[in-house]
Structure formats: C-alpha cells, structure tokens
Image: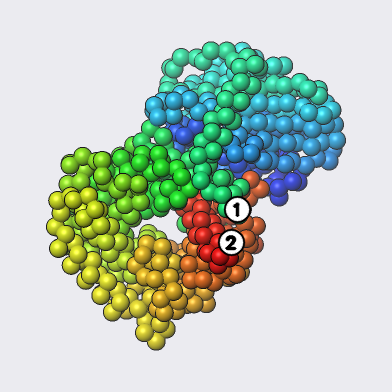
Amino acid sequence: MHAPTTGTPSGQGRPHGAAAPPGGHAPYPPIAEHGMVGDLQTCALISSAGTVDWFCAPRFDSPSVFAALLDHERGGHFTVAARATGESSVKQLYLADTAILLTRFLTEDGIGEVIDLMPVSRPQEPTDRHVLMRLVRTVRGRVRYTAECRPRFDYGRTGHTLSGGPGTMTFRSEVADAHLQTVGPVRLEADGADAVGGFVLAQGETAGFVLTTCAPGGEEPAPVSAEAAEETMRATAAHWRAWVAACTYRGRWQEAVHRSAITLKLLTYAPTGAPVAAATAGLPEEIGGERNWDYRYTWIRDAALSVRALTDIGFTEEAHAFRRWLLERLAEGAGPEGEPLQIMYRVDGDPSLEEVELKHWEGYRGSRPVRVGNAAADHLQLDIYGEAAFALAETADGLDGSGHAEWKAFAGVLDWLADAWDRPDEGIWETRGGRQDYTFSRVMCWVAFDRGVRMATAHARPADVPRWTAARDAILEQVMERGRCPSRRSFVQRYGDDTVDASLLLMPLVGFVAARDRDWLGTLDAITEELVTDSLVLRYDPHSSPDGLAGLEGTFSLCTFLYVDALARAGRLEDARYAFDKMQTYANHVGLFAEEIGTMGEQLGNFPQAFTHLALIIAAVTLDRELGAAGR
C-alpha cells in the first residue's frame, strides 16, 4: 500500500475574480469561494480555482475523499483549471435554476470553462457509487489546462494504490475505490499514487473527467463518450429545472429563493428524506479558534424548520419524506437519558455520532481541533419536541394518513414531555457551559403541546388532551412570569437573567406571542440594541452569557434572516426590507451562505448551511406578504 502523496502548495488564497493559481490549487481559499454540486446523497465543494476541496462518499456523513479545506497538504484535492501564463481572472456561476456549476477562466490566450455536476439517477435508492463529472471546453482562443487528482481516503488516514493507463486510472484503498476516466484529448500520468496531466484545447474543443467512487473492489464503470457526457449534463439540467418549476414563490426575491431551495434539496439525503445541517465538518466559526464542529448530520430542529420553509413555497413532497423519517425516530425512542428523541442523527437514523479529533490535520488556516462526529448529540435540548410537533403539523394533513402506531408514538412523546418540560437543558445553541432554564426551550415545549392538542382534536386521535392542555397553559404562565424582564418589557434568554437571545425571534413565527404584542416589541428592541450590528445579528453575547468555549464568533446569518421575519411581522417594513437587501450582499458569488459573517464581511463556519437558507426563504415569504398587505 503506497503512503499518501502530498500536493505542492502553489499560490495563495485570493479574492473572487483574481488570477487563478498557475496549475495548482490555492491553499485555504476563503470559505465562501466555493460552489456546491450534488446528487441528493452526497455533494462536492468546488472552488473558483477549479479545485474540488471537499467530497465525502458514499454519503454526506462518510469519511472524505477530498478535504483540502481542512488540510492543504494531507486532505486531498481534484483540480482542473486553466494554466494562465499572464493576466487572468475567474468567474463562477450556476446554470440558471440548476445545481450545475460553471467556472470560467479568462486568460490572455483565451477563455476556458469547467462545468461540474453530479448526475441525479434514482436518488431514493442508497448506493455506494457516485459520479462527479467535470467537463472542459474552450470557447475562445486556445487554452492550456492542468489536472491533478490526489485523493486521500478516510480523512487522509488510509493510503491507496494507483493502476490503469492514460485514459482510465483507478485509485484503490481499503475503504473505497475511485475510478477516473478521461474524455477527449486528455492523457494522465502517475505522480506516485496520484494522477496528473496537462492538455490544450482550441476554440470549440472539449474534454472531460468522470470520477466514480465506489466500495472497495467495485466494478469499473463503462467508458463514457463525449456525446454521453453532454447528454448527462442536459439530463441533469432538465432534472433540476423540472424540480424548481414546482416552486410557488413569485415574490420579489425569486432568484435568491430558488437558489436557497436548491441548496436545501442538495443537502437532503433522498433515500430517507433527512436534511443535513451543512455539507462540511470542521470549518471554523473563528479563524484559529476551537469552535469547529461537524454539521453533516440531521438536527431535528434544522430539519423541522426546513419543512416549514419548503412547504411555504410548494415543496410538500420533501415535507412528507422528512415526516416519515421523523416518525421512525419517534417510534425508536433512542434519546439519551431516557428521552424519546436525540437532538441529531445520521441521515439513516443511526444515533451514534461519537466525536473524535483528526489530530493529523492542521485545520482550515490552522483552526484546530478538527472534529468529526458530534458530542452535542448527547445534549438535552427540550425545544426539539416543539420543532418535531411543528414539522408534523406543518405538513398538509398533519398526522392524518399515518398509522395508529405512529400516532401512538407521537402521543407517547407528549405524555413523556408533560412530566419533563420543566427542566434545565443545554438550549438551542448547544453551549457547553452547563444546563440552564432557557426561555426558548420552554416556548417550544408550549409549541409541542399546542400542536399536539390541535392535531388530536382535528383528526379525532386518542390523546390525553386535558393533560396536554394543562401543560401548555402552565408553560405559558411560567414564561410570562419568569421569562420576562418587567423593567425592560422584554423576554429574556434564561430565567433569572436580563439578557436577550436571538432564538426569541422565533416566538411570533411559532405563534407563542403576537407579532405586535407590547412585550414582544420590547424584546425586538432589546435584540436590536444588544445583538444587532449593521443589520447582522449575534446569537447571544458570550460575555454576558458564557458558553464554556474560548474565543468569539461572528454574527449568525440564520439569526439575521429571523430578524427580518420578526421586523416584517411587527410592521417595521422599511427596516425589514433594508436588512434583507443588505444581507444579500453577504452571499457569496453564487448565492450561498455559510453559518456566520465575520467582522470584515467574510463567511465563517460550515458551508453552505441549511439553517441560513431556510431562514432566507421564510423571511422572503413573510416580507413579501407584509409588503403586499401594506400596499393594499
């Protein structure tokens, strides 16, 4: 077994539109300097330098094949780029209403393009075979290209061998294989256990690379012709455009909403209907800091709100798929400490998410430790029961149409919660500073009972409705008594404190409080004063609310869009529209958002983040509705 080879650093991280590195991938490009392609079971991040910096197979939560984002030398990468000798620039975009990424290299010699896509074929059937297709063409002049394929299997922990000839090369390891086929006038040669090559295309000429990953010893794929590759691209574009055509949103921000919807779809594991929180692991919330988590799992909270966002714009099939996945988790009752639910799972419902550190990796720009798995899975976060009930109630028919066993499982959860809701927990932000009596957790427990009572009544299902109603009312009284600061006329982050928290922005959305209630408007004012800067919103202030971690974090893009939603509901439409439009300037060049925005407007944290994109959709729908009502 060959030891893994390492790439040679060439060039530096660069702003979008600057010259591409000549024949190599830039070490640690900005997090935002990527687009994403996927096949609804896994995905790849591709920088505007033409480099696949992140790709895990066969699923989102599988070990990586390429992960140069977390270690430039040892992570592995797959670069296809123009080799510019003079001045050059790069432009990257999506083909409209698709998940096909186009990277254009504008050089003194000509203009070349790399088109990246992952074909979507029977996505509901789990498979260990996934195809990343990279088509190359010169549209003006004569362009020289370079290619490097340097996989590093199993987070760079497993070596591989290389076999094959110039047209087809196979990388074999103990954990996975990867077959690389070339299309057109491309010849690769071995560089240790990796493959490299260069080629020239004149105007109108095309070439391509087809990378197929599979289980160890898997059958080699059939040869791919140039005509077949072009047909695959057309079929993939047609697939995405047909899906987007079902969108019912016709508002002012249609392009941003469509891109967010496609992003949420790309982050959903089609065989189970479970969305992951983000495509990546270990990207830092603070450069050089320790807030580096693995987000490639399904959080009950994130997924439930994704259901709301997609349902709002007409994508009910996705909502029903997640409902089925959620009901299976309720029936299993696999939470820690006897709870019915765990806060997050793997995409197939496996609750095992042991957190380990990849100590051999240096992390993105030295941000360590690099973690995979997530120890927060063992947290007690009582708000998830409200989000679960919210998701079930948001589908068109609630639990109507589900079997008696599914309803009994859901009812059993609420019976358990009736005894458990009045407990401290870790809260929505998964802090590691100990359990507290968080106001938001109580609010979402109220939502659980409120939606449970509504569904039981509407569908005549057996339930202890009097007990659920009593719990709902008790929570409301407790929050009004202990979850408010009378002197500030504001709800607070946790009982016995006077600080605020951006999670409170969800209170009017879930119906706990009227959007123009006096105490809610006081809360909105307090959040604006304490947590908002240039329309960007912090989750909380770690100085006044210690979270058990070192360092600071940026503003949370999710919270900014929730702020827009709350402003719009409160009738502050000018402020809401200004904040929403300004937030669009923080999107990356292809409309994607990471988790956070740093002090210089840079994107931080895992990327792209589903929570941010679902909140963008929610905010756009609410703001359009309120602007329309004001106009009438």
Q: Is residue 172 left or right of residue 25?
A: left
| 587 is higher (above) or lower (below) than 244 | below
Crowd band around label 1 with a 10 angstrom C-alpha radius: few (<14), some (14–19), many (20+):
some
Q: Which mark is residue 253?
A: 1
Q: Which mark is residue 52?
A: none
Snapshot quadrant of residue 419? bottom left
Residue sitting farthest toward the bottom: 487
Q: What is the x, y in percent for residue 614?
A: 48, 52
Which element is circle 2 on? helix
Task: Say which mark, if any, is on residue 580.
Answer: 2
Q: Are marks 2 and 1 in contact (CB under 8 Å)?
A: yes
Q: How many marks?
A: 2
**Residue name at image x 46 percent, y 45 percent:** 314
385 lies above or below 324: below
Res 402 quadrant in image: top left
Q: Quadrant of the C terminus?
A: bottom right
* Residue 102 coordinates in the image, percent (x, y): 67, 35
Q: Nearer the viewer, residue 123 or 518?
A: 518
Q: Is residue 425 visible?
A: no
Camera-near label (2 vs 1) is: 1
Q: Residue at x 39, y 26 (%)?
A: 125
Residue at 60 percent of width and 34 percent of height: 100
Measure the alpha-carbon separation of dots 2 and 1. 10 Å
